[in-house]
Image: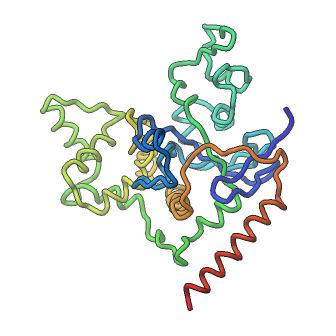
Amino acid sequence: MGCYSVSCKLSNLPIVGYTSAVLIPLRPIDGHIEFDFHKDTGTTVICCNEGPLVYFHPCMYPIRGTYNDYGSLNDIIRDDNTDILEEYYGLTIEQIVGVLTSNRKDDGFDKRLCCIKDPSQPDEFGEPIYLERYKDLIKISCNWIHGTLYDELTKTTHDGGDKFENIDAIKRLYRVGPNDKDFDEVLQEFVDEQAEKGMPVSEENKLIEYFSHLHDMNFSSREVRRVKKLLLDFNEYEYNHNPLSNFYFKAVKVGKLKDIATRFYKFNDYMLTMGLFYYPTGTCHQSGDHEGVRTVLKTALGILEQEIADFDR
């Protein structure tokens, strides 16, 4: 098979070789009611409160680079997110992206997968044997977003102003505890209380359990909700906790990820605005039909501008 292009999930702009691109890793939402709700009855609209998170939800912050003309990223831009992913998985970001973008994880016939295979157990034909610590990684799918579009849109929001301008993840994390206590102290008190109740909390899950506890107690702090929205939406619809969120949390507490998290928060709002779901990108013309996409977008823009003019009269 030769080279091929992909489409931007938000805009349908072609992403071809040497195009700036953003890869958004996704985890399927197993057992979510919306997935099966209309299977037997049919519908014209999926009405839900989950916004873009009906079938898949982001499980990592976006990875940025250049589309390599064959379904993956080159020239990956290193940032706080890539550093955290490398620390968490014990792989280079190039290896991680190679695994994420491999479409042969089912049968293992891709040399990029060698880094996560068990070297002590050779593959049987069509049945790769992966190391236990990477069995979560091979389940992740991805969205493609046009990199230039992502950068431009996340500079501001669609309402004409930067409504997220005052996001400060660091300060918020230290205001979620009662009486302005240091957050680590508040978190440890929670862990100790749970242990006394005979419900011990593991180190890797203590952050998630604490926020779940606040939610169950109808804790109304705006700061808690914002921190949860910014960092923990990755876990909201998972049945199995993902300790990667704890790595993100620790990074935020020392001043990292602020710009990355803020930009992604803005981007997610555009997905909701456009009525789109996170879902792996579909196929398109092999080398991208730029003229065809321009015709569609130009026609749609003309209709939209006319409808706005009619509405303003």
Residue at position x 37%, y 61% in the image: 171
| Whole-percent x, y for residue 68 in the image | 79, 43
Q: Image height check: is 312 above or below 142?
A: below
Horizontally, residue 260 falls left or right of residue 35, namely right
Q: Quadrant of residue 178?
A: bottom left
Horizontally, residue 250 falls left or right of residue 162, namely left
Horizontally, residue 114 falls left or right of residue 180, namely right
In this view of the protein, which residue sits in the foreground, 31 or 178?
A: 31
Residue at position x 42%, y 42% in the image: 37
Residue at position x 40%, y 48% in the image: 232
Q: Quadrant of residue 131?
A: top right
Residue at position x 74%, y 54% in the image: 20
Q: Residue furthest bottom?
A: 313
Quarter of the figure that contains the N terminus: top right
| Whole-percent x, y for residue 209 in the image | 29, 40
| Whole-percent x, y for residue 253 in the image | 41, 51
Total numbered circles: 0
Quarter of the figure that contains the C terminus: bottom right
| Whole-percent x, y for residue 121 in the image | 61, 8
Q: Image height check: is 76 above or below 90?
A: below
In this view of the protein, which residue sits in the foreground, 132 or 15?
A: 15
Q: Residue furthest left?
A: 197
